[in-house]
Image (cartoon, rainbow, N blue to C red):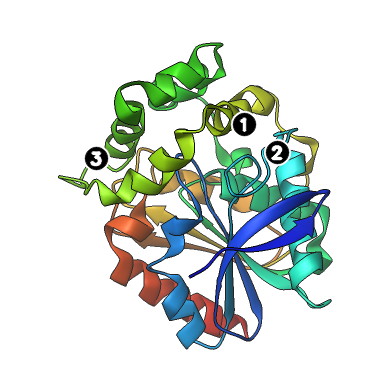
Amino acid sequence: MEHKTVQANGIRFAYLEQGSGPLVILVHGFPDTAHTWSDVMPAIAAAGFRAVAPFTRGYAPTEIAGPYDTETLAKDVLGLIDALGEGAPAVVVGHDWGASAGYSAAAMAPDKIRLLVTLAIPHPGGIRPTPKLVWALRHFFTLRTKTGGAKLTANDCAYVDELWQRWSPAWKSIPASETAHVKQAFSDPACAAAACAYYRAGGLKTPASQKLPVTVPTVAFAGTHDMIEPRLYEKARHKFTKSYEVVQVPGGHFMHREHPEAFRTELVRVLRDSI
């Protein structure tokens, strides 16, 4: 799939595209790129949808341009819907930071999103810090520091491999190909710095948009071996005023890569049910 580009929310986004039909925007997380959806996009296209996977702000070949706060990331998603959606509401599928952006985007402009699908991150409204969770999220503190970029890129981005293994603990012998694209992206120090800026911009306060209810139908995918336990998705149920389904699938944080067939099957079911 070749890179295409589009202007949205004031910057130039690069994206991958496959299929035709109702728009499904797939938003990657960290440490990752739009290529994370390569096993998912053909199934979405075959089901009669147009799958678009942007490289998020700061991840080349998208422009490296701040700010990187959650509400700007949400406005990026909404801007992409405006630029690519031909006036119709879209399905948003978000993983990790993409999930966070999706929760905010759905709260800010529910008329633009007909279905929200999130992976690996429950709505922050359902999360209460515990010592175990804080320890699991310690990379938030590491990457916020001035040396975060150096930590991220040292020794051929060994920290990227460490994070993938930490967050998908049951996935033994993760192939080098899984992290090759993001390591290539982080070979540009500006891109690595932008990835760390997400964590500095995130802060410790809940964004205003995530204090609002989510008023669009939502499906949250929870990995049964993820560091974030599926029960936390149930604790977030009060944040949703429309239908809210929690789908448990095998795998950890990168469930869609670890067990692509199981994930694809459930995602396609969810998409078809939304028509």
Q: Mark 1 or mark 2: which comes first in sequence?
A: 2
Picture quadrant where residue 182 is located: top left
Q: Is residue 2 left or right of residue 63?
A: left
Disc 2 crowd, CA 10 A, few/some/many (<14, 14-19, 20+) = many
* In the depicted structure, whether residue 121 falls above or below residue 46: above
What x and y, as percent, mark residue 123? Answer: 59, 45
- Which amino acid, mark 1? Tyr
Tag 2, which secondary structure?
Answer: helix
Task: Please provide percent x and percent y for residue 145.
Answer: 54, 12
**What is the quadrant of residue 217 in the picture?**
bottom right
Of callouts 3 and 1, which one flags the residue occurring earlier in the amino acid sequence?
3
The residue tagged 3 is 169
Q: Residue at x 45, y 45 (%)?
A: 32
**Residue in view at x 37 percent, y 76 percent:** 265
Mark 3 vs 1: CB contact within 8 A: no
The image position of residue 270, as x and y in percent, is 51, 76
| Res. 213 in view | no
Please give the residue where the numbered disc 1 appears in the rendered image. 198
Return the residue at label 2.
Answer: 70
Give the distance between the C-alpha atoms of the residues marked 1 and 2, in whole angstroms. 8 Å
Viewer-side residue, 109 vs 12: 12
